[in-house]
Image: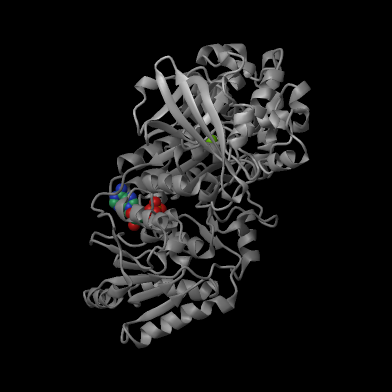
Amino acid sequence: MDNWKDVDRPSGCFDDAVHALPGIGEKRAAALAALGIITIGDLLFHFPRDYRDRSVIQSIADVSPGTVVTIEGEVTSARSLRLRGGKSMALLTVSDDTGAIKVTLFGRGFLVHNALKKGTRCLFTGTASEYKGLALQNPEYEPATSGDDADKLHTGRIVPVYPLADGITQRGIRRWIFDALKRLTGAPPETLPATVLKQHGFPDVATGLRHVHFPPDMQSGKQARNRFAYEELLLMQCCILKRRNACVETAVGIQHVADGRLLDRLRHMLPFTLTTGQRRAVDDILHDMSAPRPMFRLLQGDVGCGKTVVALHAVAVAVDTGNQVAFMAPTEILAEQHYATLHTLLKPLGVRMALLTGATPNAGKVRNAIAGGDIQVVIGTHALFQKQTVFQRLGLVIIDEQHRFGVAQRDALGRKGVTPDILHTTATPIPRTLAITLYGGMDISVIDDMPPGRKPVKTVLTPEDKRDDLYQYIRTQVAAGQQAYIVCPLVEESEHFAQLTPLIDHYTELTEGAFAGLRMELLHGRLDPREKETIMMRFKAREIDVLFATTVIEVGVDSPTATVMVIEDAGRFGLTQLHQLRGRVGRGTTQSWCFLLGKPTTPEGRQRLDTVCRCDNGFDIAEADMKLRGPGDYCGSRQSGMLDFRVADLLQDVRLLDAARRDAADIIEKDPELTAPEHQPIARGIQRFNDMFT
Ligand code: ADP
Ligand code: MG
């Protein structure tokens, strides 16, 4: 909101404090400050959240009760009626050539002595009613003093509706913005090149501002708003592309050879054929890797779609070319699991591998082997990128499931020598607009299909009184050779031990009660990595029937015979998190079930859980999640400034973003440093977005 000052904007009245406007004193200035409005420029960039079309003026004779009408007429009688409590009411009769209507305004008795006294011409908008003749109660009103249409603010035109704060009324802010617009003389400096304005039919800054607030027609208002949204998106895109260019120009990449022996053997060894989505992703990746420019790609696909197999192709290509691969996972558990998976597949092919996490006992030895080039593929946590780890010839970095491995981190990697190819994988289904914003500098491959034979997990909201039945169902499933998860929304890895108590109590209750005789284990973030691993391996080996866990299992545990998941207090999880969690079941061919416990207390909460039950597609869920929670929340935490667009809306503006992306690519291609006179305002404007990549 207050970022506009960083953007190249006209000086003059823009920078004046709002006090400069008539009717704004200390109190109102303070109220406006609560909306982030300090200067007249801020005020002008406080855009309407909606409009009311009050442009059509009806004859009084045509007014029908129950409809919203705008009329214009003369006040032919006016009196004030005193009410109890010191208030008063204005009672008017308003007439035009066709008829008369009664108008009452509560608490506005004083108006009959000035603005609405007998004989004034006036406009009213309100819902007509029928009570001893036609009537309007508490309509919007506006004296038609000047007779100039342009001076109408509240009726008789398309009227803006603003976001408000305490102490600010629609009438007040409309008036102030109207006055501020009047002061906007001359042509304020323009950020967008003339060609761009013309190409999209966008108005210039001054016209744009006028039309956003007081549009002559709905289309102009929309187009003006789009102009400013587009401007933000274009600046963001230019910023991303300029930085990306800078990286690529200085970066020395590796041209990997994508037809080596290991790749060939891997292809022959796979016990299945790749899905179309997987094949496309592999093509993208191999194409990138064999190009001289370093790869910087995001591989996105729902849980279980087979990203690991795709990544393995990249590993094979790097190793074939004589380079090392670093495979980075967000947690030790996941690193260990990936190690186990890759080990099974790559060891028989003679690939030399190692695991390196904070828990690795002989880390020094492993590091030596990496530095000496004896290890070809190392899997680990961020310990991989500590200073002590020196690679002999790092050619490929795969980063699994970590939000925001940005340009800055990539630059850091590049500084270690040649810039390795980077493949970032994520199961978090990120709505496209958001992905472009968050992962702006990256190319994106999406796997949008699933290996054949998968049955979507059936998800049901389960009432508390069905809990015993549910436990009984789990017992029968276990008897049939299946496994189950019980997930509780507790204990993040960093949380305090004391918070484990309810979890342990619940666990104990079940082991002694409903699940007596079953093999149960408790898995949470406070266990040490060895213990966790042991439990997970035992679960996978089917030595455990029911795994009682926290979200530790969100990414990690993988057992095809796990077919039931119970999620306690489901309302406390995010939608995408619930979707990720249930991805732990349904990994085999048996129909799997996910039971959501915990009754939602609000309609919104209910709607959220219904969404998860209804959709099995991660992208739909992500979009719903973003709609319900907003893009900032969706990403877990508000990333500083980066999703705080003033005008643009990542849910709505998909098409504008596409256009901005294309135009930005054009601009940066022709003028990489943005030194041309028509691009200098853009160069200044992108400062604001620069922060988000550092
Ligand atoms: P992700 O990492 O995307 O969650 P994984 O790579 O772990 O998914 O794959 C999930 C499971 O699906 C693995 O057991 C894998 O062997 C199997 N799989 C992957 N691709 C295919 C395929 N094309 N056909 C059959 N099974 C596959
Ligand atoms: Mg390359």
Q: Residue at x 44, y 72 (%)?
A: 549
Q: Is residue 554 left or right of residue 612?
A: right
Query: Quadrant location of residue 121?
Result: top right
Q: Is residue 693 left or right of residue 604?
A: right
Tell me how many marks there are: 0
Closer to the camera, 600 or 689?
600
Q: Is residue 688 left or right of residue 590?
A: right
Closer to the camera, 398 or 608?
608
Note whether 502 is above or below 681 in the view shown: below
Residue 102: % across, % down: 45, 30
Residue 594: % across, % down: 31, 63
Quarter of the C terminus within the rendering: top right
Residue 587: % across, % down: 31, 59
Query: Quadrant location of residue 364?
Result: bottom right
Closer to the camera, 628 or 448?
628
Note whether 679 is above or below 85 in the view shown: above
Residue 558: % across, % down: 38, 63
Q: Which residue is drawn at 51% across and 41% down?
A: 321
Q: Is residue 39 visible?
A: yes
Q: Is residue 632 left or right of residue 316?
A: right
Note whether 114 is above or below 365 in the view shown: above
Quarter of the N terminus within the rendering: top right
Q: Is residue 316 visible?
A: no
Rendering colour mode: one colour
Closer to the camera, 614 or 546?
614
Q: Residue at x 60, y 20 (%)?
A: 210
Note whether 380 is above or below 4 in the view shown: below
Q: Residue at x 62, y 47 (%)?
A: 86
